[in-house]
Image (spheres, grey):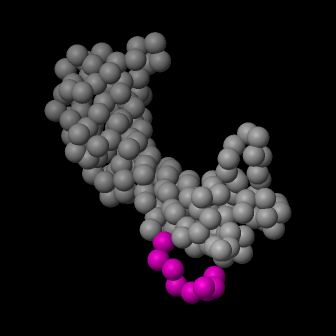
Amino acid sequence: MDADSDVALDILITNVVCVFRTRCHLNLRKIALEGANVIYKRDVGKVLMKLRKPRITATIWSSGKIICTGATSEEEAKFGARRLARSLQKLGFQVIFTDFKVVNVLAVCNMPFEIRLPEFTKNNRPHASYEPELHPAVCYRIKSLRATLQIFSTGSITVTGPNVKAVATAVEQIYPFVFESRKEIL
């Protein structure tokens, strides 16, 4: 088994965060009273609205900015955001769906081996930081992709990046480095 051999790694996307604007002022009190599945947080000045299909949670501000979390793909995030905009239109707001952008993707990937974290950190010092007394994982940052990887000794890697492509590229880039520091099976 070598680092160059084709190993199929399953990257499971667990959360996609997106943001969009409605280009109109939103009356949060009206949304809270007339909308379905809403939580009005008056002290913070926002409304949380949940959709069941796709399963997303939206944070709505009166300025018209909306952040959606919980989707498992970029397409699902856009579909959920559009459904949310449509439900606001049905409440009587002049919503125009604009400035949609995926801002964050969280994914998990499991390596087929365990990793020796101190050795990995020593070999990748400028990019990797490991404080076992504070956190059980190595934090590895790839600045060019704007991705952060949390690498655990079990071989589990949590990747945070700006989009799905960056997350997949980050896993491809990190694989040879973690392969060097894998634990040998006796």
Segment tinted magenta in the rendering:
1-9
Question: If the image is split into quadrants, where does the N terminus sit?
Answer: bottom right
Residue 58 visible somewhere in the drawing: yes
Quadrant in the picture for residue 127:
bottom right
Main secondary structure of the magenta stretch: loop
Picture layout, residue 110 above or below residue 26: below
At 29% across and 33% down in the image, what residue appears? 50
Rendered location of residue 130, percent (x, y)? 76, 51
In the image, 78 versus 173, the foreground residue is 173
Picture layout, residue 125 above or below residue 67: below
At 32% across and 58% down in the image, what residue appears? 75
Rendered location of residue 4, percent (x, y)? 61, 86
Rendered location of residue 6, percent (x, y)? 52, 84
Rendered location of residue 131, percent (x, y)? 77, 46
Question: If the image is split into quadrants, where does the C terminus sit?
Answer: bottom right
Left or right: where 166 falls relative to 138: left
Residue 23 visible somewhere in the drawing: no
At 44% across and 68% down in the image, what residue appears? 10
Quadrant in the picture for residue 153:
bottom right
In the image, 182 versus 73, the foreground residue is 182
Find the residue positioned furthest to the front: 186
**Residue 161 covered by magenta stretch:** no
Picture layout, residue 122 above or below residue 64: below
At 36% across and 49% down in the image, what residue appears? 71
Picture layout, residue 138 above or below residue 170: above
**Residue 2 covered by magenta stretch:** yes
Left or right: where 180 falls relative to 45: right
